[in-house]
Image (spheres, helix red, strand yellow):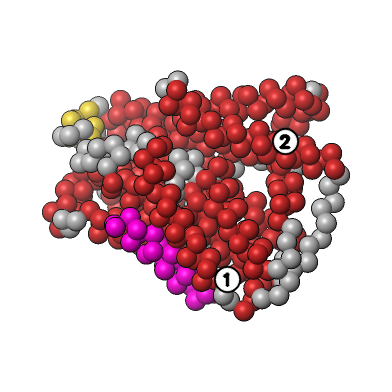
Amino acid sequence: MVVLIFFIGYLFIIFGNIISINKIIPSILMAIICWSLIIYLNLPVYELSQYLIRKDPNNLLLLYLGKTSEIIFFLIGAMLIISILDEFFAFEALKELFYTDTKRKFLWKLSITSFLLSAIIDNLTASIVLISLLRKTIPNYKERLYYLGLIIISANSGGVWSPIGDITTTMLWISKKVTIFYLLKKVFIPSLICMIVSTCIISNYPIFNGNIYFKKNKLSINNIKEGFFMLKIGSLLMILVPIYKIIIGIPPYMGMMFSLGVLLCICLIKHGKKFNDCIDDILKKLDLSGILFFFGILLSISSMESLGILYNFSNWINNVIYEWKITSFIFGLISSMIDNIPLVAATISMFSYSYFIDHDIWHYIAYVSGTGGSLLLIGSAAGVAAMGLEKIDFIWYLKKISWIALIGYISGFIYLIL
């Protein structure tokens, strides 16, 4: 019964955009119903170690709630930092860096910025920022779509080599499957290859021939200076989050909340009552629906884990497919069709006690779950955001961008193998 509820809820999440149902609804209902059935029917549940250890359902629920909350509070801290930066023109000031003369140069600037920015502020936020930039610089809608396609590929590529660049990489990091040094060492070059190969291919499109003309920023010089200052401070504080963990040993969500607290203090000292009055408006910008979706899907996955289903499934995969590199490649293709968050959550649960920290399989999973999400428009948060904000047609993306994303994905994967 629990498996059936999970399967039905998951289908609603996958096809939510087609049937016009917000993913938050099936996500939350699926989580609550699955755990309610486990508790009401007193189903046998287990804590996953090297073996399955039977536990009390209520106690195990509290354990998984704690693990889920780590990721949720990390996201809340990151989202609030982004909202504060946006309030003080940080992303408006960023536009000053994009002034150039040709469309091709602008494309490369956009691609590189998307790649680097997503590693700092996450791929979803980077995509939204750059989509806003494009709206003000590229008035032609059809032309803008090609830029958007590259933003999705570059943002997803940039997110996979940073512990805070993609929610799936963050999950691997918080779950102690990867460390920052080895994640950067193993995944940075493959993700860079994916971005460069994709940009090289798309830059040869005739649509990127010719010059580009920018409208000057309407912000005052003081506002631009303020924006750049906040952008530097905010970026530094987010970069410090993994450093806190290395030096002090505090969990990532505490590091993110500490950076948020420091940024709030800086804003309060710098702006005083003016900032105090706008804190409520900043809090209202928090993407509560996204947070609740993550909460529901992670708690739903934990119900499957507690029943021992994922443990048994991992054993079945290991028996059928002897080479984990093939398994990870297939997972990357699957992540283009379904949400990569539950996919990675399930992968962590399935292989947690088969492979140690910083085993290559986790670096492969980090790479394929992010870059593989670019193959289809619905495969990543960046793609879904672009689809929602710019009404990109699914079939158009499939014809014009998907094959480019696939070549980039395979190019980086080949480097991983070699």
Cα gap from disc 2 to disc 1, whole angstroms: 33 Å
Location of residue 328 (image quadrant): bottom left
Q: Residue at x 34, y 34 (%)?
A: 176
User: Mark 2 packing: few (<14 Cα in 10 Å), some, or many (20+)?
Assistant: some
Residue 292: assigned label:
none
Above/below status of 406 relative to 29: below
Decide: marks 2, 1 in contact (CB < 8 A)? no
Front residue of 134/410: it is 410
401 within the magenta span = yes
Question: Which amino acid type corresponds to the residue marked 2 in the rendered image?
Answer: Phe
Q: Is residue 30 left or right of residue 59?
A: right
Percent x, y for residue 212? 74, 68
Percent x, y for residue 363? 34, 47
Can residue 33 be seen here? no
Residue located beneath label 1 in the image = 203
Residue located beneath label 2 in the image = 229
Question: Which amino acid type corresponds to the residue marked 1 in the rendered image?
Answer: Ser
Can residue 359 be seen here? yes
Percent x, y for residue 29? 43, 45
Q: Main secondary structure of the magenta part?
A: helix
First of labels 2, 1 by sequence position = 1
Judged from the image, the secondary structure of the residue bearing numbered disc 2 is helix
Q: Residue at x 54, y 35 (%)?
A: 239
Q: Is residue 163 left or right of residue 346?
A: right
Front residue of 392/53: it is 392
> From this viewpoint, which residue is outermost toward the left?
319
Q: Residue at x 44, y 46 (%)?
A: 161
Judged from the image, the secondary structure of the residue bearing numbered disc 1 is loop
Q: Which residues are magenta?
A: 395-418
Percent x, y for residue 49? 21, 32
